[in-house]
Amino acid sequence: MAPSRLAELLCVREGHFRFESGHHGRLWLDLDRLFLRPASVRPLSAALAGRLARHGITAVCGPLTGGAFVAQHLAEALDLRFFAAQRHQHHDRVTYRLPAGVHQVLTGQRIAVVDDVLNAGSAVATTARELRHRGGEVVAVGGLLALGDGARRTAEDLAVPLEVVETWPHELWSAEQCPRCARGEALTDPP
Ligand SMILES: O=P(O)(O)OC[C@H]1O[C@H](OP(=O)(O)OP(=O)(O)O)[C@H](O)[C@@H]1O
């Protein structure tokens, strides 16, 4: 992978990692550190803002926390409305909801749903469904980074364009199918 500003901000480490899901993978990203210095993220947000501006958006919404931070940068850069979707967990099911106080303001808005990093795309998908349910018009999906093709499939399902600053291949394997295990490589300790 070519080093990039985004890779530096995400403190990307390469190795042979075991994730919470039990899958094995090559990259470890530290999303918690991305916004330690918001000014460092602004050039990336500006690049995304330029792409999303083509779609005639009037508002930006992101799932808390990382997606909402990006959405706020974009709303500032483009002088648009900003919405943050709040995470709700019921047993294993995670959904994102808009606070009741903003429901009325959503009607008629052309909204881009954004995230910092899109993996499976589930956070933006459930945020988009909530926005549509509340009367908003979701017209684009965006992010700083898409890992693999989950984001593309999510945008297709929502029938909207996808705009991302970078896309990286996502190599994720079950423990049984992990090529690094097959080569006898030891697991890397997480940071
Ligand atoms: O495309 P997905 O498979 O949904 O994964 C991407 C989401 O995962 C991370 O959020 P996380 O759930 O870790 O919450 P956070 O933003 O509060 O860190 C990231 O910020 C995205 O919102």
Image: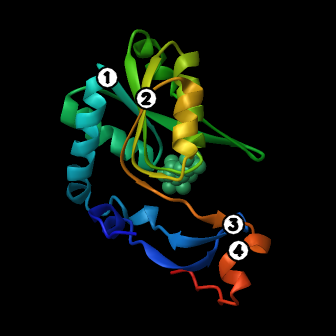
**Residue 7 percent across, percent down from the top left:** 35, 66
- Any mark on residue 55, and which? 1
The answer to whether residue 184 is seen in the rendering is yes
User: Residue tagged by mark 4?
Assistant: 178
Residue at image coords 21%, 43%: 46
On the image, the x and y values in percent for residue 119 come to 55, 51
Query: Is residue 67 toward the left or the right of residue 128 in the image?
Result: left
Q: Which residue carries the number 2 mark?
A: 161
Is 178 drawn above or below residue 106 in the view shown?
Answer: below
Q: Crowding at label 3, few (<14), some or many (≥20) Cα neighbours within 10 Å?
A: some
Q: Amino acid at mark 1?
A: His
Of pointers 4 and 1, the one earlier in the residue sequence: 1
Q: Residue at x 56, y 41 (%)?
A: 123
**Is the shortest distance between ligand 1 and the CB of mark 2 under 8 Å?**
no
Q: Give percent across and percent down for residue 92.
A: 76, 47
- Distance of mark 3 from mark 2, alpha carbons? 28 Å
